[in-house]
Image: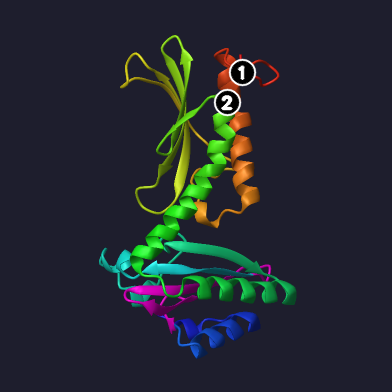
Amino acid sequence: MKQPSDIEHSARYARYREFLLDQDFTEAKLSGRFYRQTADRVVFAVNLEEDEEDCLTVLYGFTSMTCLLGKGVPFAYCGTNSVICQVRNLLCIWNEESEADAERLISDFYLRYRGCSGKELAAVKRERQRVFFGYFARALKPLGFKRRGTTWTKELGEGRSLSFEAKRSAYADMYDFNVILRDTSDIHRTASVERVSMLGRKTYNWQLMTEEQIHALITYSLETYIVPKLKENCVLTEAGELK
């Protein structure tokens, strides 16, 4: 099997790789994955990936080594990735300008969290989740939806309710979103479940979404799934106002 250094890469990739190695990062056996320990059982990870358009994608963030070691996966082999890294960001580098921005953003992020323990990282992640779901709460509350955990529900009357549910994947730190019409007279009976699919995507890597992408997802969910059902059930007028 080829080692990472044996794989052909662009000059930009090679420059970033040498920089990371000079900064005491360890290179995992899987190509493009680097990590550096910052606290007890905590590492800062930087993953590099190129595409055919000469774009270098950089995933970076902090994670606890126990995320993989606890599952019997050798950390030195695979490092971390976009759905395991606990607190993560993603950016793309096309040119010198975006490269300069990337260096600043990654450096600022590293300096901000480099002393965090695994417990403190978990708190950072919870705060990120609070902010993320806050976008949905602000969109759904005016329509009369009430939140419980990561599910928002509106009573429709006549024994029916409509829910918008954020469901975490059983295999990774990602979410899918379901729109559920229920018969409230029987909590075990579900009239219909639709999974939000925008541009063919059904599962969302929430920490890597930009604010623009989050708003696009919410707008799409409202216009495609939620508002039509509210109108069908005579809860909204054609102008989108509550009756």
The location of residue 107, given as percent across then percent down, is: 57, 76
Residue 97, x across and y down, in percent: 74, 74
Q: Measured along the vertical axis of the image, is residue 191 above or below residue 71?
A: above
Which amino acid does the dot numbered 1 rest on? Answer: Leu
Instruction: Pick the quarter of the image with the N terminus.
Output: bottom left
Query: In the image, 68: left or right of 62?
Result: left
Q: Residue at x 62, y 36 (%)?
A: 220
Mark 2, other Cα within 10 Å: few <14 / some 14–19 / many ≥20: some
Q: Residue furthest bottom?
A: 22
Position of residue 189 relative to residue 178, above or below, is: above
Q: Which residues fall within the magenta stretch?
A: 26-55
Circle 2 residue: 143
Residue at (45%, 20%) from the top-left corner? 161
Q: Residue at x 62, y 76 (%)?
A: 103
Asked if residue 132 lies in the magenta stretch, the reply is no
Report if the CB atoms under discs 1 and 2 are less than 8 Å apart. yes
Quarter of the rendering occupied by the C terminus: top right
Q: Nearer the viewer, residue 151 or 53?
A: 151
| Residue of label 1 | 242
- Give the image location of residue 2, x and y in percent: 44, 81
Q: Secondary structure at mark 2?
A: helix
Separation of disc 1 and disc 2 at Cα? 7 Å
The residue type indicated by label 2 comes to Leu
At numbered mark 1, what does the secondary structure look like: helix, strand or loop? loop
